[in-house]
Every structure is written in C-alpha cells, then in structure tokens.
Amino acid sequence: MTRPLKAAALNPQVRRVFRFVPNPPVRWAWMLRLMQSGSGFGSTPKMPAGMAHRFVRLGPGAGVHVYTPAGTRTRPALLWIHGGGMVVGSASQDHARCIKLAADLDIVVFSAEYRLAPRHPFPAPLDDCHTAWMWATGHAGELGTDPERIAVGGQSAGGGLAAGLAQRLRDEGRTQPVAQWLFCPMLDDRTAADRDLDRVRHYLWNNVSNRAGWSAYLATAPGSPDVPAYAAPARRADLAGLAPAWIGTGDIELFYDEDRRYAQALTAAGVSCVLDVIPGGPHAFESFLSRTPLARDYLARAERWLSDHLTPVR
C-alpha cells in the first residue's frame, strides 16, 4: 500500500518552506485559464550591466529570449526550456536563472517560449522548441555562437521537452545538442496513470496535477498504449546515439523513479549519463530555495558538468 510522504521526509534545508507549498490548481479549467493569462509572454528582464537581451518572436505564442554576455568572441550556448507541467508558465519565470547562467559560464543562453496545452497539445509545444533550436543554430554566425557547441536543457516539463527534442533532432539528422541538461524532467506519462501515486503527498507537483498536465498535453488519457514519438521520451526504446546527459532529481519527488529509469536506460544504450539525486529533495527546490547550501552545491555541480561538455576537446 502506498504511504503518504510526511514533512519529515523533506531535506532539513527546505522543510520549513516546502512543508507549506501547495500544488498548482491545474486540474480546474477556470483556474488554469487564469494562470495562463498571467504568464508574462515576451516580458523584458532587468539586465545586469554589460549583458545584452533580445526577444525574437518565432510564431503565434512562440519565441526565444537571447542573453549574451559582454565581449566579442565565439561562445558555446544553451537552449533552455521552462517548466510548468505543459500547461502553465513562461520563459519569464527563468529570466534570473538564464542571466546567472550566461554570466557564470560566459555562454549565450536561448530561452524558448512555447505554446501551452490544453489549447495547444502535442506536438505544438515541442514544435515551438524545435523552431527555437533551428533558429538558434541557423543564426549562429550572427549571434556569435558555435553551432557545434549548443546544449539543450530544461526543468520539469521543460526537461521532458528537451529530452524529446534531442530524440527528434537525432532522428532528423539535424545538428544535435552537445549535451542534455535535465532538471527533474517530466518524461513518462505512465507515472500519471498510476492511481496509487495519488495518495502520496508529493510537494509542489503531485500525481493529480501530473495527470491533468499529461492529459492536456497528450489530448488523451495518460498511459494509453499509443503515444506519439517524442511526446513521452521515457517510452522510447532506442536511445543509442543521443547526447551525453545530466539528470538531477530529488529522491522524494514524483518524477524520481521515471528519471532514474531513464538515466539507467541511457547508460544501457551507451549514452554517458550522470544522475544526481538529492536526498529529501522536492520538485524544483533549486528554483524556489536557490540560496540554500543544498541548492547552491547542486547547481554548482550541474554547471560544472555543463561547462565541461560545452568546452571543446583540445
């Protein structure tokens, strides 16, 4: 029998805050519409001195933010994809994260804006991320980036979209990402179909919310036998030839099992993969409590891994 998580399961550094964090009310259509209406599409961030920002609209509801550090040189880059369960959020929620990353690693960061389900189910969100990738690689010379040194990454739903995008680019024979950088990725709709998980109190994103997100994205019940390619990356059998991956997750969050299994499947397919598991780490804790030593150490390890994979072999 599934047993509910207690607050004591939370890492002590995040317990005081996360024990009171509610799940977003995404299963209620009227609340979802309200949340989507305040998403801040195309908003302009407050930039530090010396760093440039531009927003390029790539279609209705889609676009890409570009963060460029000061100075002229050819840089590696990252295409970042925000989270939100496929149904909420916008690139604006990660402005600060992208600015810090561009400054820390001296790279260009592209942040994808994509359409949201249920109004725009699969493949629309993935198509928008694909368009952002094609724009970024196609304008590399103009943007001062090396198209052979661009990684793809994201958090939660964004991590799932990043993994699906990597699979699609490999199959298309396009310029592939040099690395996959996946924070608590949402990879497997079959998790949402497991009703036993409804009884577990997963902090910030539980299985009731998860089922609402997957149902909206797939426009069908999660766990159905026929799910389109790239929609649920963990369903893919052939993972050979994909870019090296870093996957970070907490051991008490809803996606822990699917993230661990995907890391194991990548390794079994010959893909280099690092799985960084945070004891007592709830979903996306590094975004909400980024100043805790736990989050700082976690993000520092992640950035070191990404930097190493963006650095050309000499």
Image (cartoon, rainbow, N blue to C red):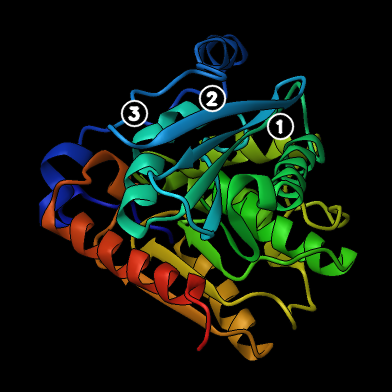
Q: Identity of the amino acid at label 3?
A: Met
Q: Is mark 3 on a helix, strand or loop?
A: loop
Q: Is residue 187 above or below residue 47?
A: below
Query: How far separated are the C-alphas under marks 3 and 1?
Result: 34 Å
- Mark sitting on residue 257: none
User: Relative to residue 103, is residue 86 drawn left or right?
Assistant: right
Q: Is mark 2 on a helix, strand or loop?
A: loop
Q: Quick check: marks 2 and 1 in contact, CB under 8 Å?
A: yes
Q: Quick check: marks 3 and 2 in contact, CB under 8 Å?
A: no
Sequence-first tag of 3 and 2: 2
User: Relative to residue 149, is residue 13 drawn left or right?
Assistant: left
Residue 209 screen position, x and y as percent? 52, 35
Q: Residues within 10 Å of mark 2 (few under 14, many from 20)?
A: many
The quarter of the picture where residue 28 lies is top right
Task: Identify residue for label 2.
Answer: 26
Asked whether 128 or 36 is in front, the reply is 128
Q: Is residue 313 above or below residue 191?
A: below
Task: Identify residue for label 3.
Answer: 47
Q: Who's the residue at 66% across and 65% down the image?
A: 177
Residue 27 visible: yes
Residue 116 visible: no
Sequence-first tag of 3 and 1: 3
Residue 89 screen position, x and y as percent? 51, 28
Task: Identify residue for label 1.
Answer: 216
Q: What element carries label 1?
A: helix
The quarter of the picture where residue 172 lies is bottom right
Q: Identity of the amino acid at label 2?
A: Val
Q: Quadrant of the N terminus?
A: bottom left
Sequence-first tag of 2 and 1: 2
User: Relative to residue 157, is residue 275 drawn left or right?
Assistant: left
Q: Residues within 10 Å of mark 1 (few under 14, many from 20)?
A: many
